[in-house]
Image (cartoon, rainbow, N blue to C red):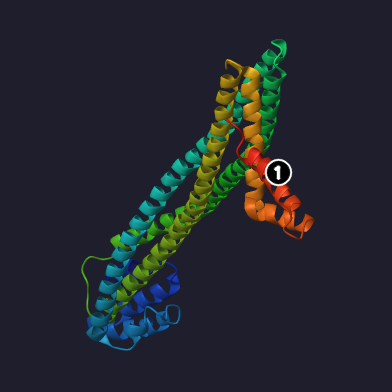
Amino acid sequence: MARVSNTVREYLQQVLPPGVDPGVVDEMARKVARSPAPAATLDAELAVFGKRFQVGCPQTFAVAAAATGDEALAPLGKAIEAHQAAVQGLRDAIAKVEAEGHAIEAANQGKAAEVAQLVQSIASRKSDLESAQEKKGRIGMAALILGIPAVAKVSAVQMVMDDVRIKELNGQLATAREAQRDAETRLAAHAARKATLTTKLAALQQKEVELVQGLATAPARPVGGHLGAAQAAATLKRREALQANLRSQLELLEAVRDSAAAVGVHLDGAIRDLRAQLAAADKLVEASQKDLLQLVKVITADDPAAAATRWLDQQVAAKTKALMRELGLDVNVYISRLVKEAYPANTPEAELLRRELTKALQAGLRPPG
């Protein structure tokens, strides 16, 4: 009897999940051992045991409690197969999401590097502007030494124009650096969130190992009757726990991936804005370099003073055209309005004023080349 009792106890300890009261297992083993015909009463005793165990595990024993003997094994077996397929599906999903997360994070590192490079490029454009402005100042000083004040005036005007450009570029650079700091903050926040989630993930992975080991140590030879149902139900419970564990792992990995993706979207927007700012900075530098070339041509002309005067007149003409365009004014319409206000009637004086205004404005708009 002791042998039978020990055999049943060992078997029950193997098929039932951890946490079952050892006293219940011992009681079941003793009942079987005391029975005059253990083989005949095993099913009945295990049926009683199954009902008692069902109180603690209602979900996994719901199918077993609804049937007796081998009738409980078929649905439990199908449930186990379904769980096996679900577990494999979860493992595949985990591998896919983990790979996606790694790819997104790698892409984010590249994007962060591009953000830093764009900010550095914008800063270098400011250096280019300051260098061009310095050269214009040296040319202006040379013009004063040579006694060509008109050229010095051109130099001064261009330096003021560069001041405006540098001020504009300083604003762009401040915005660019703020975008870089924001990107770094978001990357750091993602790293901190990932570290927290990874700690939780490690605990789940350790529990997964324990669950898999529990399934691996289950008895290899199935039996029938209520003992077989108990074995199948215990296996199902372990697989349910494994499936829940993997589902939790998947949710954590999805959270890591989605966090990285959100950072990536923000970096994409920052890169678009920084590229636009760099293009605008390039235009500022290009305009300054063009002015510097004109200044060199002016001071090296056969008549530097005349060349300087022409350049200044062109600037006045350009400013006049820009102002009238901004105001939405046509030259002829503007002149007619001024003449009509001065001379309502069409008189010789009105015609004379029209000619003088036209000459003056046209001279400003199209200075002699």
Percent across and percent down for residue 175 are 63, 44
**Which residue appears at 37% of the width and 84% of the height?**
62
Q: How many marks?
A: 1
Q: Viewer-proximal residue, 127 or 312? A: 312
In which quadrant of the rendered view does residue 240 lie? bottom left
Quadrant, the C terminus: top right
- Which residue carries the number 1 mark? 356
Q: Quick one: which residue is furthest to the front in this view?
A: 348
Residue 265 seen = yes
Quadrant, the N terminus: bottom left
Percent across and percent down for residue 94 are 36, 58
Amino acid beneath label 1: Glu
Percent across and percent down for residue 87 are 32, 65
Left or right: 348, with 61 as reference point: right
Q: Viewer-proximal residue, 342 or 170? A: 342
In which quadrant of the rendered view does residue 307 lie? top right
Percent across and percent down for residue 11 are 30, 69
Q: Viewer-proximal residue, 108 or 95? A: 108
Left or right: 364, with 190 as reference point: right
**Which residue appears at 62% of the width and 29% of the height?**
311
Residue 141's place in the image compared with 82, above or below, is above
In which quadrant of the rendered view does residue 338 lie? bottom right
